[in-house]
Image: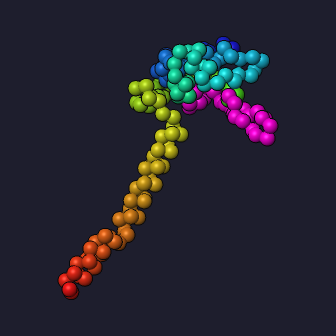
Amino acid sequence: MPASWTTRVWQEFRAGNLTRGYRDVLLTLATYGHGGSIHPSHETLAERVNCHASTVLRALQAARDLGLVRWSERRVRAAWRSLRTSNRYRLIVPKEPVTPGQRTNQQSAGGGESKFKKEAREGSRAALAAMLAGAARLPDLLAARRQAWEGGRARV
């Protein structure tokens, strides 16, 4: 377990960039290091820290946003299939100094959201706005049908 990385996690926690749960998840992650290979599952970390697997995922995303962790997926061969297993984690000590207040308001309330998720949500809102604008330019088919119906009834 890299002592400087652990120190950095504590610094980020004290600066208000990590919650207690996130800090505990990250410090527990560091205990799984075996010869440079770290690969516990989210469920294993959650059980060890006594939290939910979604908390583990949010903690890892927050650590990625802070530049503390990188990961890549691992795969194993099972007959003709390639199955995804736990991730392979790499602990990184950022060179930049700790900047307090990097968490968003939603993260500090406990419902953390990574910047990638936020960008995707904002992109979805922009796409929805474009679709609604396009729909507003279309003719009102219901009004046209109603008008045709009323015109046909008036002739009888």
Q: Which residues are magenta?
A: 60-86
36 relative to 144, above or below: above
Q: Residue at x 76, y 40 (%)?
A: 81
Quarter location, residue 62 = top right
Q: Nearer the viewer, residue 85 or 29?
A: 85
| Residue 125 seen in the figure | yes
Q: Position of residue 93 (x, y in %)?
A: 64, 23
130 relative to 145, above or below: above
Q: Position of residue 148 (x, y in %)?
A: 28, 79
139 relative to 49, above or below: below
From the viewer's perspective, tell me whether residue 2 is left or right of residue 12: right
Q: Position of residue 50 (x, y in %)?
A: 53, 15
Residue 80 in the magenta stretch? The answer is yes
Q: Residue at x 43, y 50 (%)?
A: 125
| Residue 59 seen in the figure | no
Q: Position of residue 6 (x, y in %)?
A: 62, 15
From the viewer's perspective, tell me whether residue 32 is left or right of residue 108: right
Q: Residue at x 41, y 64 (%)?
A: 134
Residue farthest front in this picture: 156
Q: Nearer the viewer, residue 87 or 94?
A: 87
Q: Residue at x 56, y 15 (%)?
A: 49
